[in-house]
Amino acid sequence: TALPAEPRLGSVELPRTLDQLRKAAAACRDRTWSRATIDTKAGLRSMYGPLGGPVVVMGPNNFPFAYNAVGGGDFASALAAGNPVIAKAHPGHPATTRILAEAAREALDGAGLPPASVQLLYHFEQQDGLRLVAHPAVAATAFTGSRPSGLALKAAADEAGRPIYLEMSSANPVFVLPGALDERGDGIAVELFESCTLAAGQMCTKPGLVIVPDGPAGLAFVDRVKTTFEAAEPAVLLGARVLEGLREAEARLARSGAELVAGGRTATGTGFRYNPTLFVLPGREFLKNPSAFQIESFGTLSLIVKAADAAEMAAIAASLEGHLTGSIYSHAGGRDEAAYAALEPALRVKVGRLLNDGMPTGVAVSPAMNHGGPYPATGHPGFTAVGFPAAITRFAALRCYDRVRPDRLPPELRDENPTGSMWRFIDGVWTRGPAGGDATTP
Amino acid sequence: TALPAEPRLGSVELPRTLDQLRKAAAACRDRTWSRATIDTKAGLRSMYGPLGGPVVVMGPNNFPFAYNAVGGGDFASALAAGNPVIAKAHPGHPATTRILAEAAREALDGAGLPPASVQLLYHFEQQDGLRLVAHPAVAATAFTGSRPSGLALKAAADEAGRPIYLEMSSANPVFVLPGALDERGDGIAVELFESCTLAAGQMCTKPGLVIVPDGPAGLAFVDRVKTTFEAAEPAVLLGARVLEGLREAEARLARSGAELVAGGRTATGTGFRYNPTLFVLPGREFLKNPSAFQIESFGTLSLIVKAADAAEMAAIAASLEGHLTGSIYSHAGGRDEAAYAALEPALRVKVGRLLNDGMPTGVAVSPAMNHGGPYPATGHPGFTAVGFPAAITRFAALRCYDRVRPDRLPPELRDENPTGSMWRFIDGVWTRGPAGGDATTP
């Protein structure tokens, strides 16, 4: 993968992956995720439960641990909901996936779960992938990867009526308001550089689109970013396909009228290397063809758009498709409040996570995280791929029990709280306490 | 609509509709529906909010009030989530819809909401409907109606990446276990008759598929149902298309090998009338071609399947597609527990609502209701069309705020509880209390 063993894999990603698995296991034990809802007066009790079939998980190239089809977030979510998993190994790290699958197999044995609860496929033809996600025995699919692959899988799953959760692509727009630019433009340029070069820019939350005010401060910002990009060593990419994608993105941006100001050259050194690359474009040009300039470039390739004024910034936000994140940098002392108020409503509905004064890379595993967003960032604006308990509920069906006899109810819906720690919504109150019995006459 | 003004419309459906609107309004005010989640340690706060565009609502023919595109459950849910609604009137009750739209307009004025928050279209060509649900400015669609129309709309919305919530069709299987049949077969036959003839069988939860044990008790049950069906007056249907659909269903069942035992004749009297119609089929024949025998028949047309034993019953359950409901009648004294245990797991994953000892008609507006189910009953197994707050969340996007300054947060996510009554998930605890401020270093 060309990802450094230290600190990236050993000290960052592996601990994060283990933390994620532990949180999923805790959520699974605690069972709050199932959103048990009890209406004793109506004799109705409902909860989320397994889908009744396996979940296909297809992981991406860029997180061999945290998003691996075995052991990653989707895997943990699908399994925590009680579903078996059919994992598709990414060709970029088959041996890592095998080791994780062996660990999973050991864990299944230890927990007394059926060995087929986790299955692993190394490779199949594209057509077989499309057949798999549409197969009647498959309950749902989780996919993280490129937009073309995601859309092909989505079409197949949609036609078969099978839920599919996609994390496809995002340009992660960053808006820098005039006050912030005056106040700390240099610092923001450094933050941008660091965020863009993290993991050679191969992050789903890499800021690929930056909107700054035109004028002297904006030009100084562009210069500063250009300098940091040019001074950086070319980074080694995950593979040949990533480099091809970046070259295609460069060609598309140039063809569409963006100006290359840094990088774009053939990099020297071993491996598939890439020089941090920067394009610049006036806001009015962006607005003539917004869809051409907000396609994800997977790697350190970003576009800075110079907006004429606050209205043009808001117009750019309104012209966006769905993205995972959106950031707004504003003046600490309140000088940008009017511009923020004009921009935020337009940006808010286009992104899953809105940041203030921060770059989007780094996705905390928190119940309040949304690693999701409107189409085409994902396939549905209501779900997050990261953070428990919400990520688990994606792979669950809502199950209502209507006057079902008490001894036949699942433990989550009986009067007594099955774990003690589980939160349940009982007669309009979220509580860890027991439920009263159902009224005799529903 | 040929639905009686009393008691059906005036004393049953209208009060239910008003109750539903009041509950949606209460949920909207209370704001628990937005599932505000606060992680003060990580500086992350998230909630469900409006989609950023209008929701298209297309109502069915059978509930001129409760499911009307203006004033019905989907309408109330979409509006409660903060979205404008583009309603499509059903051609079966355009004037009712107009009156409801006038009332809605008055309510919007009274509440100071923009007049375009509710828009009404009376008619469009099918192609324009497909364009509408796929339009970039439309955020989502709710549809209740036939499977062919629903699937056509789903294909268009899916391709455009727009969420669509469908309530399409359901046979609502009812399983009668041997002990229950011995104990109270006659009573169950009467319940079945009443459920099948409610609103002339034009209910999405009408039991269209009944599975009973073969043998003398099963045959006596069939006879009893046949007698009640034959004794009933032919009921007036909603319109010509419903009658055509029933004739098509009769022809399909007969062609597939089911035996007609009651009805199936041309009914006399004014209006589009239909005689309660009953078919019977051996379980082994059902299992040879399960998909032919579980298609919804909209009207009083049901199929009784005679199962050879408990294993065949479970096999029939396993061969089901997704349905809204499934019922199991069992012996009150515990004689059917083994058969129940064999049947329930197979049936549970195929239906949204599982009933014990009850017919599925009658859908309570409760937080614990699931009026939904796996495909093709609906388009997604995780959502309910009835019951607040869950029905509202369908029309909402998950919005995360990452280190957003406190005074810029929506009221739901500020430290103070904005309504006092709102439940929020704060640092792992569901509470109506305030949140502590975010940690300074996220």
Image (cartoon, coloured by chain):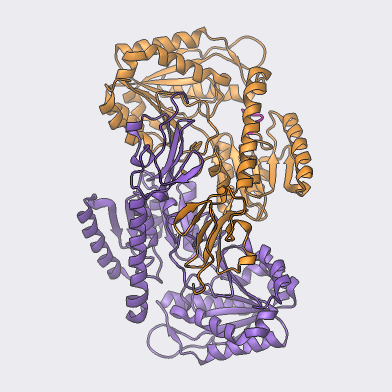
Chain colours: A orange, B purple
Left or right: A253 as drawn, with respect to A271: left
The x, y position of residue B163, in whole percent, is 46, 49
Residue A396 vs residue B89: left or right? right
Q: Residue at x 20, y 56 (%)?
A: B110
**Depth check, front residue: B253 or B108:** B108
Left or right of B196 on screen, residue B125: left
- Is residue B39 positioned above or below B386 on the image? above
- The one of A404 and A296 positioned closer to us in this rendering: A404
Report the span colored magenta. A62-67
Seen at 66% across and 37% down, the residue is A69
Picture mark count? 0
Viewer-closest of B314 and B238: B314
In the depicted structure, whether residue A284 falls above or below residue A131: above
Residue A170 within the segment the image draws in magenta:
no
Left or right of B42, for residue A62? right
Q: Position of residue A78 (x, y in %)?
A: 63, 45
Question: In this view of the protein, which residue sits in the foreground, B129 or A141?
Answer: A141
> Looking at the image, can residue A66 be seen?
no
Q: Residue B101, position in %: x, y?
A: 27, 62
Magenta stretch prevailing secondary structure: loop
